[in-house]
Amino acid sequence: MDAENTMRLDKWLWAARFFKTRALAQKHIELGRVLVNGAKVKNSKNIASGDTIALTLNSLPYEITVLALNSQRRPAPEARLLYRENEAVAAKREEQKLLERASRASTAYPEGRPTKRDRRQIEKVKRGGW
């Protein structure tokens, strides 16, 4: 691989807008949350067009194929042109998001702990004074 057709993995992930900073990209790579062609790699791993990257962000899976390299961080619409996402994994991720959202909506107090007023009403119901 020559230097013109390759670039560092952490720099590409940053340029493709998967991470806000290169330091965050490096941290995820070191923790093993980023795999290139199915193998755990280091930050300095050089990637080229056609490589497959599997990563986990916020416990959601991504599987992407590198289409182009760009060392500059560009606007999001341009960054999306650098890769193609696996449709099956994208559908699975959306399903996970919907399940998570539904589980949060079904909790008794989605905003957090009951307020003092809520707690008093609960006690009133328990005592049968409702």
Image (cartoon, grey):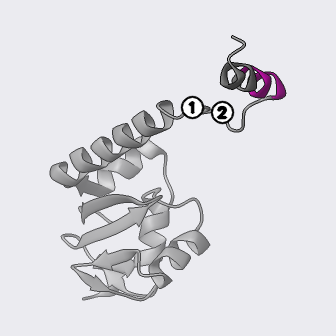
Numbered disc in front, either 1 or 2: 1
Q: Is residue 45 left or right of residue 91?
A: right
Q: Can residue 75 be spotted in the picture?
A: yes
Q: At 45% across and 79% down in the image, what residue appears?
A: 29
Image x and y of residue 74, in percent? 49, 51
Element type where label 1 sits in the image: loop
**Most common secondary structure along the magenta stretch:** helix
| Near-viewer residue (77 or 87) | 87
Image x and y of residue 58, in percent? 47, 58
Image quadrant containing the C terminus: top right
Where is 53 relative to 126, above or below?
below
Q: Which residue lies furthest to the front in this view?
A: 128
Where is 31 relative to 103, above or below?
below
Image x and y of residue 21, in percent? 60, 65
Q: At 42% across and 58% down in the image, what residue appears?
A: 16
| Near-viewer residue (85 or 12) | 85
Numbered range of the magenta stretch = 116-121
Q: Name the residue under label 1.
A: 108
Q: Mark 1 and mark 2: span between their CA atoms?
A: 9 Å
Q: Name the residue under label 2.
A: 111
Q: Can residue 71 be spotted in the picture?
A: no
Q: How crowded is mark 2: few (under 14 residues within 10 Å), some or many (20 or more)?
A: few
